Amino acid sequence: MQVCGVTSSSDKFFKPETPKLYDADGREIGCKIDIHTAEEAAFYCPAPYVLDPPNCFNQVYVDGEVKHLGDVSQSLVASHSNHFVVIKFDSELVGRGETLRQTPPLECHCVTTKGVVLSTIQIENYYAKEYLTDIW
């Protein structure tokens, strides 16, 4: 499982091979997960921080808009435990008319109570419903 999120700099919590996500200035801001290859990913957002959208991965940002995961893909399954949210790819659930796509990435953030983004996870290479391309 590939994992990222908010930890202290001394924490060796996450595997170093998890692909990092960088902003325009080259600062690490989270991770980018190929869910088709990884099959499972987790995002860590400990208190006092909160997930954005609040029900991540059941809800995800797609091009800046919050969407319900089930409206995007039948083959992605969300769950949670403690401060982790988990998303799994289940190839047996790929729906009719769903195609493999890189973009747009599915996103969740870990933010402060004032809304400052501390970490971002992007999920790419997932199966999605064909009709959604019209509204993206």
Image (cartoon, grey):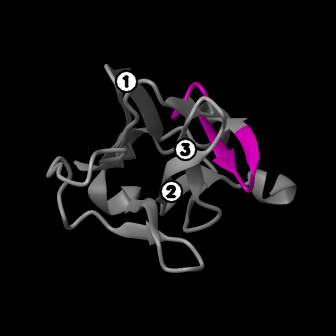
Which image quadrant is residue 66 in? top right
Report the Cα–Cα distance between label 3 and label 2.
9 Å
Quick one: which residue is furthest to the right in this view?
135
Going by the numbered disc 1, the residue's amino acid type is His
**Residue 80 circle label:** 1
| Residue drawn at x 62%, y 44% as measured from the top left | 116
Report the Cα–Cα distance between label 2 and label 1.
17 Å
**Of the pair 89 and 82, the residue shown nearer to us:** 82
Q: Is residue 96 above or below residue 59?
A: below
Which SS class for mark 1?
strand
**Residue 68 circle label:** none
Q: Residues within 10 Å of mark 3 (few under 14, many from 20)?
A: many
**Residue 122 circle label:** 2
Quick one: which residue is furthest to the left in this view?
12
User: Sequence-wise, which precedes: disc 3 or disc 2?
Assistant: 3
Report the Cα–Cα distance between label 1 and label 3.
15 Å
Quick one: which residue is furthest to the bottom in this view?
25
Marks 2 and 1 close (CB-CB < 8 Å): no
User: Sequence-wise, which precedes: disc 2 or disc 1?
Assistant: 1
Is residue 41 found left or right of 116 in the rendered image? left
Question: Magenta includes 65?
Answer: yes
How many marks overall?
3
Looking at the rendered image, the disc whose residue lies closer to the viewer, 1 or 3, is 3
Q: Position of residue 134 (x, y in %)?
A: 85, 58
Question: Magenta includes 9?
Answer: no
Going by the numbered disc 3, the residue's amino acid type is His
Q: Which residue is mark 3?
A: 109
Which SS class for mark 3?
strand
Q: Is residue 50 above or below residue 34?
A: above
Name the quadrant of the C terminus: bottom right
| Residue drawn at x 58%, y 52% as measured from the top left | 106
**Of the pair 4 and 75, the residue shown nearer to us:** 4
